[in-house]
Amino acid sequence: MKIPMFSPRPANGFHAGFTLICAAFFCMGVAVTVNSARADTHEEPPGIAGAPYPNMPGIPPTGVRIGKHLGVPESAKGPAIDPAKGYRLQELGEGLYMITDNCYQSMFMVYETGVVVIDAPTSYAQHIPKAIAEVTNKPITHIVYSHAAIDHIGGSKSLGGQPIIIAQDETERLLVRANDPNRPIPTITFRDKYTLKVGSQILELSYHGNAHEPGNIFIFAPAQRTLMVVDVIFPGWMPWRAFALAQDIPGYFAQVEEIKQMKWDTLVSGHVERTGTHADVEVQLEFMNDLRDAAREALKTTKPGEGLDISDKENPWAYYGNYIDRVAIQCVNKVTPKWSTKLAGYDVFIWDQCYAIVESLRLDEQ
């Protein structure tokens, strides 16, 4: 944790020296900032909402209900789901198929004597055998886990049988900790790369480091020129909140750039209504770079302590929260004119994205 402007960044995060930092802060009385400009004392009871910050965006912040959300652009939509089936099957070529409920996505690959399932989302795992039966009566022999998240692989046990389960080492570690019977422990694990050859079919699995979460892998079908990477790219949509809850935001940016540079024709992203294209990746990367640039500028130009109630001068959490709120406001205001109509769900998560990138930049760059 970092308290802005009070001390050099601690080498090891929140540590014993924090007490000295706060003590110095209290002694300073934050005279440079709190005594400047608009600080004052209010009579309202403490802990309730005060007057809005200056220049508040029209999009309500996280925690404030939006009456009617921005519409979903046509470019973000995919083919409709048949309500009677509850899923949609899309052929990706040469025995590879995507299954989706237009919220989650997974794949399966048919080979001479069996089927390889790639992820089994809980939302439609019960439909996976029916989807496979539309194509073949061969048994499921393998399951590939994209990563450990329950929403993407929590239906694996329900598929039955004794399939070989393949995952990256970190996914195994997380699943051992989770001890969830619905997410069986992998039977084969790898560190960096693993090539699955079944009959005439090939899947190339590779680990590119932590971004969304440890163990999240790239899954490439070379014959079909299809790449599956889950919870990183969101074709046509704003990424899920805080860059899809990325545990390593610089790593997340690096993986989006890496996906852009790779050679593939179709992207299966694990979410949203349709498959992705290189143009989708380029749009998301442009948005992310604009967001990062806006946050960097806001961090440089926002003055800590402005407008803070003078009675809060000895509360570093209030000082910090006030500063970061105003940085996020500037970030939202900067990117909204360009992006609010281009990405589905923009108004849902733009505040989360700004807060997330601001904190990443403070801890990784400042």
Image: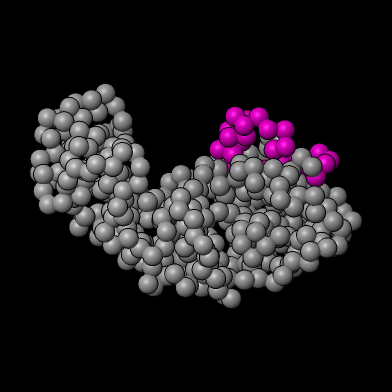
The reply to whether residue 310 is in sight is yes
Query: Quadrant of the rendered structure where residue 313 is?
Result: top left
* Nearer to the camera, 80 or 139: 80
Whether residue 109 is situated above or below residue 207 in the rendered picture: below
The image shows residue 306 at horizontal and vertical percentages of 19, 50
Q: Is residue 164 left or right of residue 284?
A: right
Count every numbered label the image shows and give the total: 0
User: Which quarter of the figure is the N terminus placed in?
Assistant: top left
Q: Is residue 99 left or right of residue 256?
A: right
The image shows residue 49 at horizontal and vertical percentages of 35, 46
| Residue in view at x 80 percent, y 45 percent | 159
| Residue in view at x 41 percent, y 63 percent | 59
| Residue in view at x 38 percent, y 68 percent | 336
Query: Quadrant of the rendered structure where residue 297 is?
Result: bottom left
Instruction: Reply yes or no: does residue 162 show up in magenta.
Output: yes
The reply to whether residue 263 is in sight is no
The image shows residue 325 at horizontal and vertical percentages of 31, 50
Residue lying at the far front in this picture: please name it.
43
What range of the chain is rendered magenta? 159-183
Residue lying at the far right in this picture: please name it.
137
| Residue in view at x 72 percent, y 33 percent | 181
Instruction: Reply yes or no: does residue 94 show up in magenta.
Output: no
Q: Is residue 323 left or right of residue 272?
A: left
Query: Quadrant of the rendered structure where residue 335 is?
Result: bottom left
Residue lying at the far bottom in this picture: please name it.
74
* Nearer to the camera, 104 or 184: 104
* Nearer to the camera, 49 or 99: 49
Whether residue 285 is situated above or below residue 139 in the rendered picture: below
